[in-house]
Amino acid sequence: MNLTPREMEVARLFALGGTYESIAIDLGLSRSTIRHLRGSAMDKCDAGSMHGVWMALGWLRVPGAAEAEAHRLASALIAAVDQLRASESDADVPAGSWARDDPAPSIRSVA
């Protein structure tokens, strides 16, 4: 895939939320030229949409199997901890374990 600088710029502006009209105004081109550049970028990337172009350029990616499994395990751990906390009273929590009002470990920020 070898996009021209103008095709790359159009792809970037669409990724930033631009419309045909706004991109045409920004670049001083007609809407039909923007449509042509968009279509050309999609053809060169063998993509059916701009999302496909962004994925081909490495700007957008789908999580791999390892990342999906790590996310699933982290979510399951968080759910188990939440369930344990909900089922125990503060008096029943042994010393050294998490108390209901203690902050959860930072794994929440991973999920």
Image: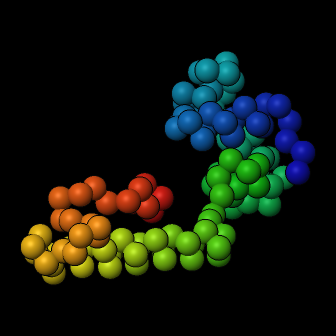
State the residue in front, 64 or 43. Answer: 64
Whole-percent x and y of residue 105? 38, 59
Give the residue displayed 24% in from the left and 70% down from the top: 95
Tell whether 36 sits left or right of 5. left
Residue 41 higher or lower than 75, as above or below: above
Residue 108 higher or lower than 24, as above or below: below
State the residue in front, 37 or 83. Answer: 83
Tell whether 17 sits left or right of 80. right
Tell whether 89 sits left or right of 3. left
Residue 62 sits in which quadrant? bottom right
Q: Which residue is outermost to the front?
A: 95
Give the residue displayed 36% in from the left and 71% down from the top: 78
Q: Which residue is outermost to the right?
A: 2
Tell whether 28 sits left or right of 71. right
Residue 15 higher or lower than 104, as above or below: above
State the residue in front, 106 or 4. Answer: 106
Residue 100 makes an appearance in the image: yes
Whole-percent x and y of residue 61? 65, 58
Whole-percent x and y of residue 23? 60, 29
State the residue in front, 105 or 92. Answer: 92
Residue 32 makes an appearance in the image: no
Whole-percent x and y of residue 13? 62, 33
Q: Assign the C terminus to one quadrant of the image.
A: bottom left
